[in-house]
Image (cartoon, rainbow, N blue to C red):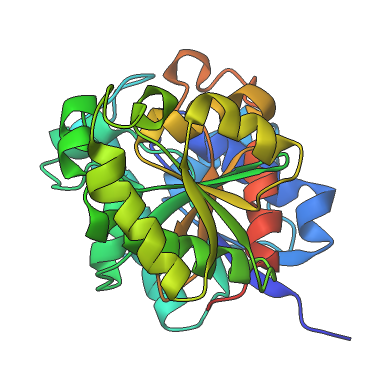
């Protein structure tokens, strides 16, 4: 009988729904029957979540690890705060430490507030960049899965104007390489990779922009020479339909919303975020802190559960 994988769950921003969905997921039959949950959470925050859900005590098969550097400090209710950012970051740091030391097999991170991180004086714009720095990872990418779609992003948390400026052949090629690596984490050895265009109609031979000709097409050609099964740049307005019906295994998207809008349209409650390129496995639900419903016992843990189940299936490449 194979050993159940240990999966560490972080608590996210304590003013959001993170503690609730972390606990709901860990208590679910789907999780407890297939893995050993490890909750990386301030004990006082966890007790608040247990009280909310009328949980008297944790089952013996669920472990609690209290981040040594974190003690519950004053946090704002249902809105970003410096205290919330500090607590969220402490949970993440400890979970990464456990994964790097191979004390857990993967980590699943609950939603954080980028504003809370900023208020706490922390430099990262989001989980992805924080995890890359904590694991000393240079090349990484943000990938999301939902339903039949997998998308991976060339640029992540940038303004649209900055994202366009950051599109270059090297960045696109690196992301194609990450797409190949990501699919192999899922056991897809010869993935069909599609690369989305940046401009309408893939620029229409330069009439609507030249990024395709100057940056994206050279990266695709280079990837083909490396032996990848890659197509593009393809107009985004038709590409996602083709991927949805099964023509491609993954889409390389140029900017955040290009990939996330169609994915969340079909899998809002079950989308999963995966950081590709790390020396550890990390997934998260594909939604935010939902401050508006936090601490009302209304949060849906479906995406958190799916993130954990996905993490348990992935293999580092």
Rendering coords of residue 299 (x, y %)? 62, 25
Rendering coords of residue 250 (x, y %)? 58, 51
Q: Is residue 264 above or below residue 190?
A: above
Question: Which of the two residues, 226 or 290, is positioned nearer the viewer here?
Answer: 226
Q: Is residue 83 visible?
A: no
Which residue sits furthest left? 121
> At 50% from the left edge and 37% from the top edge, which residue is drawn?
18
Q: Is residue 279 visible?
A: yes
Question: Which of the two residues, 207 or 299, is positioned nearer the viewer here?
Answer: 207
Question: Which of the two residues, 15 or 173, is positioned nearer the viewer here?
Answer: 173
Question: In this rendering, would 18 be left or right of 1?
Answer: left
Which residue sits furthest right? 1
> At 58% from the left edge and 17% from the top edge, which residue is drawn?
296
User: Which quadrant of the figure has residue 119?
Assistant: top left
Question: In this rendering, would 156 be left or right of 5?
Answer: left
> At 24% from the left edge and 60% from the top edge, which residue is drawn?
170
Query: Which image quarter is the N terminus in?
Result: bottom right
Number of numbered tags placed on the structure image: 0
Rendering coords of residue 221 (x, y %)? 39, 62
User: Which quadrant of the figure has residue 238?
Assistant: top right
Rendering coords of residue 292 (x, y %)? 46, 13
Question: Which of the two residues, 42 or 170, is positioned nearer the viewer here?
Answer: 170
């Amino acid at each position: 009988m194979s050993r159940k994988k240990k999966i560490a769950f972080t608590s996210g921003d304590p003013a959001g729904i993170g503690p609730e969905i972390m606990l709901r997921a860990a208590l679910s039959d789907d999780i407890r029957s297939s893995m050993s949950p490890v909750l990386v959470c301030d004990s006082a925050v966890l007790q608040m979540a247990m009280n909310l859900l009328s949980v008297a005590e944790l089952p013996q098969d669920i472990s609690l690890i209290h981040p040594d550097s974190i003690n519950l400090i004053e946090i704002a209710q249902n809105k970003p705060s410096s205290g919330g950012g500090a607590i969220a970051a402490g949970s993440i740091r400890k979970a990464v430490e456990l994964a790097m030391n191979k004390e857990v097999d993967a980590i699943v991170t609950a939603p954080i507030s980028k504003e809370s991180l900023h208020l706490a004086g922390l430099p990262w714009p989001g989980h992805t960049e924080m995890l890359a720095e904590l694991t000393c990872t240079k090349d990484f990418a943000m990938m999301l899965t939902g339903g039949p779609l997998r998308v991976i992003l060339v640029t992540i948390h940038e303004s649209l104007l900055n994202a366009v400026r950051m599109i270059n052949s090297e960045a696109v090629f690196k992301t194609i390489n990450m797409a190949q690596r990501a699919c192999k984490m899922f056991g897809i050895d010869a993935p069909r990779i599609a690369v989305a265009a940046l401009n309408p109609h893939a620029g229409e031979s330069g009439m609507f922009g030249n990024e395709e000709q100057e940056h994206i097409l050279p990266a695709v050609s280079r990837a083909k020479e490396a032996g990848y099964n890659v197509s593009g740049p393809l107009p985004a307005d038709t590409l996602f339909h083709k991927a949805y019906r099964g023509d491609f295994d993954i889409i390389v998207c140029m900017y955040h919303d290009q990939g996330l809008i169609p994915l969340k349209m079909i899998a809002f409650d079950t989308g999963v975020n995966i950081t590709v390129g790390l020396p550890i496995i990390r997934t998260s639900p594909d939604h935010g802190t939902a401050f508006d419903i936090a601490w009302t016992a209304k949060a849906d843990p479906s995406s958190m559960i799916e993130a954990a189940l996905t993490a348990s299936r992935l293999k580092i490449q």
